[in-house]
Image (spheres, helix red, strand yellow):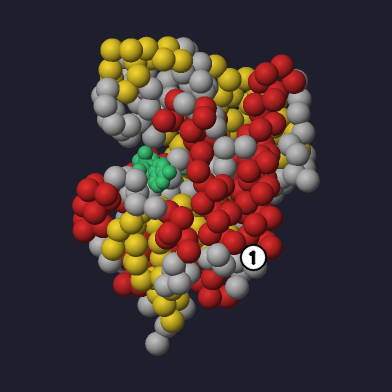
Amino acid sequence: MAQTIGVGLIGYKFMGKAHSNAFRQVAHFFPDLALRPEMKVICGRNAATVQEAAQQFGWQSYATDWQQVVARDDIGLIDVATPGDIHAEIAIAAAAHGKHVFCEKPLANTLQEAKDMLTAVQKAGVVGMVNFNYRRVPAIQLAKQLIDDGRIGQVYHWRAVYLQDWIMAPNFPLVWRLDKSVAGTGALGDLGAHIIDLARMLVGEITTVCGMTETFIKQRPKLAATAGGLNAQAGAEMGEVTVDDAALFLARFANGAAGSFEVTRFAKGRANYNSFEINGGKGSIVFNLERMNELNVYLDDDAPEVRGFRNVLATDGGAHKYLSAWWPAGHIIGWEHTFTHGVYDLLSGIAAGQSPPASFEDGMRCQAVLEAVTQSAAGGGWVEPDYS
Ligand SMILES: NC(=O)c1ccc[n+]([C@@H]2O[C@H](COP(=O)([O-])OP(=O)(O)OC[C@H]3O[C@@H](n4cnc5c(N)ncnc54)[C@H](O)[C@@H]3O)[C@@H](O)[C@H]2O)c1
């Protein structure tokens, strides 16, 4: 009989819902799970709405003070699904109470906070994992396997975009994602963190970056009433947008590869377009989240008469990571499954006493790249990320 661990989740909206689903599903689909989660408590600031969330998402209880939650004896794992301004405070307090920490991306709002969080989990000897969920798309795991096995040869190019369009209307209000004091950065940290993490996983460490950021709409209506999510209502008063709407940067990798990254919230028609292409000496790989079960692959090794890009449906439990837990080959999975896979790896890591990737070290390194891009965009030319 597997042991159990009590979970406390801080934040109950978008990511709160996605994480709750993962904790509910994981033991039912991964029978080899070494540590089963007990969904003890979900926490937010508004008692009425967090109580509703507890009921809807399947938590045993609710709370309104995260400081009490991180101190509870029946909790072994704290899941941080709040905006970035409070990641560090919650994670450091949780680690000090000896709790393992699962934290949403980007790890923090500043590099210093990320370093402090890494130190806190190391000092406490607890697991610290960042939810870079795209690592756990089976097709992206296949890309990693092909690269690690040398199937595309030496990697020369990484080319990634993450495009959205949800704030293009000039009267879209000043939600927390447009406020530097809460979000840290705009598209750069929100979307760029994901593709930086994928680049680090698939290509390797980034040694230097050169970038620009742009804020196309500099003033927007303040929020009408309560702070909302993606569907927030505008009020009459105007306020400053203090983050970037878009960021573009070039990167050099330690292995000699060259990379380009583009992230924006101003790409009309692109709701959540996360795509990359990798070119190696012997082949190329293309991924697009809108077709997340597929990997487009070109291999020089193919016979000349059939050589060309092929579309691999990465849904075979025998050949593709995580899929044996789900359905027969060809029965596709969705975005929410990446969270269940993450929670599976997290709980397995806690049972084994190891932080699975993306660890807080990975999160700190991603943060160092984000900070280097910010410095470069402010006029710094090429900047080396500070991984110290
Ligand atoms: N991995 C992904 O694909 C993905 C997608 C979206 C967001 N995120 C990340 O998840 C985090 C949360 O984003 P979201 O979209 O869920 O935001 P959201 O606005 O939908 O939800 C934020 C939640 O945090 C709670 N909260 C805020 N301050 C709090 C405090 N002081 N104490 C307790 N609760 C507090 C809010 O009440 C709310 O429940 C961010 O770091 C974001 O970058 C990750």
Q: Is residue 24 visible?
A: yes
Q: In this image, 256 relative to 306: left or right?
A: right
Q: Quadrant of ligand 1?
A: top left
**Towards the viewer: 126 or 302:** 126
Please say if 326 is above or below 184. Answer: below
Amino acid marked by disc 1: Ala
The residue positioned 46% from the left and 37% from the top of the image is: 274
**Towards the viewer: 306 or 71:** 71
The residue positioned 60% from the left and 73% from the top of the image is: 353
SS class, disc 1: helix
The residue positioned 51% from the left and 51% from the top of the image is: 90
Determine the image quadrant of residue 3.
bottom left
The residue positioned 29% from the left and 45% from the top of the image is: 46
Determine the image quadrant of residue 160.
top right
Query: Residue 1 location in percent, x, y?
Result: 40, 87
Determine the image quadrant of residue 56.
bottom left
Q: Is residue 313 visible?
A: no
**Towards the viewer: 295 or 124:** 124
User: Mark 1 — residue?
Assistant: 124
Q: In this image, 22 relative to 85: left or right?
A: left
Q: Mark 1: few, some, or many residues within 10 Å (few <14, many ≥20)?
A: some
Query: Residue 20 location in percent, x, y?
Result: 33, 58
**Towards the viewer: 324 or 383:** 383
Please say if 214 is above or below 191. Answer: above
